[in-house]
Amino acid sequence: MKAYLISIGDELLIGQTINTNAAYIGNALSEINIEVIEVSSIGDDIKTILEELQRASAMADLIVITGGLGPTHDDVTRNAIVSFFKTELIQNEEVLNDIRALFEKRGRKVTPINEAQALVPKIATPIKNKRGTAPGMWIEQNGKIYVVMPGVPFEMKGMMEDFVIPKLSELMKDSTSIIKKLILQTTGIPESALFERLGNLDELLDNAKIAFLPNQYGVKLRITVTENSEEEALKKLNEIEQKIRTKVGRYIFGRGEETLEQVIGKLLSDRGLTLAVAESCTGGEVCSRITNVSGSSKYFERGIVTYSNASKVELLRVNEDTIAEVGAVSREVAMQMAEGVRAVSGTDIGISTTGILGPTGATTNKPVGLVFIGYCDEKVCTAKKFLFGDDRILNKQRATQAALEMLRRQLLGISDEE
């Protein structure tokens, strides 16, 4: 089954609202082996909606529409549906009762404009909206399925989870093709270098598909296979994964939506190790990432933000002479920060960050984007130099990721040598 997603709303076109609905729906459909072939965003205009419905109907088996079902003048999707299918609106008593019950629960009076939302196209099966007043619609016409839902994300997600996905899953259970996806999370290697290291993709994939999805933290590899059975699909995914790990395994930190901080948390917890962090340029972001993980108190002892030179000396015992000689942004100070936070906290491991995020603060020898990350345990005390870009916030995010990745590699004994 092929799906076409239509998101309706002027706010999407002008960038006022980010279209998270399409991403959610696309992922949910792919999980049940429905292929999304196109995603479009259009304005609140009946003529445009009708043209897009015509186009989508010619291309796909399933057309999913979100947006434009509210009670105001610019919510025109329902009228477009009526026009497209040459049908009429009828009052649905069950929907009307749901609307009245919702308003009563909230202690509000139902107005005629709200009651009008119980008018549903005659050919549609209403989709109950447990989180709002506008019902969704399920329409089957001319061998196609049309699903129409509100644009409010939590209302749409409720309909997807309660009705749409279960119904589509039932229709898909006899499908002869099984689509399975696997995401491998990589960091510390650019997209181009990753592509180069993987070599001949046709040979690697054997008719499967791979997508490179870069962001400021690394590159996700999404592998997609289509087979006749789930067993065959999983076997092929496993074979491809092992080939990829042979080529770039050192850069792969997780599978699926696993985060780097989750991986590190498990490594620390399994080994019974404790961690303390000293941050300068990242301003607490490393600690924030680590404490995003439930149960992090088991291994994370403390974090100290020492932004000024004085605080580095006072709280971390960094040598004043070292700062004077080589500067706060240096390999030596990063090492002393990691060693100092480990000593004052009594943990097994200390890590640190110090750098120039920009746009100010650079010197002839120390450009914007220069960062040193320190690591110290009972056997090793080291620091690594990084050169990021010119954007302050991106540099902060990349430095945080690099610090966590350096910790992961130290825990696993992965050397920096190729």
Image (tube, grey):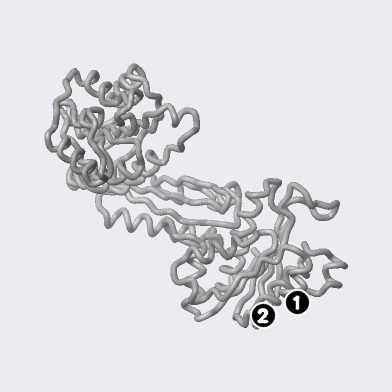
Q: Residue at x 75, y 50 (%)?
A: 368
Q: Is residue 163 left or right of residue 291?
A: left
What residue sits right under mark 1 in the picture?
317
Q: Is residue 143 visible?
A: no
Could you tell me the amino acid type at mark 2? Val
Q: Residue at x 54, y 62 (%)?
A: 289
Q: Is residue 18 visible?
A: yes
| Sequence order check, earlier mark of 2 and 1 | 1
Q: Position of residue 207 (x, y in %)?
A: 39, 45
Is residue 122 depicted above or below 169 in this figure?
above
* Secondary element at image label 2: helix
Q: Quadrant of the C terminus?
A: bottom right
Q: Position of residue 143 (x, y in %)?
A: 18, 29
* Secondary element at image label 1: loop
Is residue 120 depicted above or below 243 in this figure?
above
Could you tell me the amino acid type at mark 1? Arg
Quadrant of residue 21 within the rendered picture: top left
Q: Nearer the viewer, residue 101 or 281?
A: 101
Q: Nearer the viewer, residue 270 or 234?
A: 270
Q: For the residues labelled 2 and 1, say whether their Cβ atoms are less than 8 Å apart.
A: yes
What residue sits right under mark 2 in the picture?
344
Q: Residue at x 60, y 50 (%)?
A: 190
> Gap between marks 2 and 1, in whole Å?
9 Å
Is residue 226 depicted above or below 147 in this figure?
below
Quadrant of residue 351 within the rendered picture: bottom right
Q: Residues within 10 Å of mark 1 (few under 14, many from 20)?
A: some
Q: Nearer the viewer, residue 37 or 298?
A: 298
Quadrant of residue 285 within the rendered picture: bottom right
Q: Residues within 10 Å of mark 2 (few under 14, many from 20)?
A: some
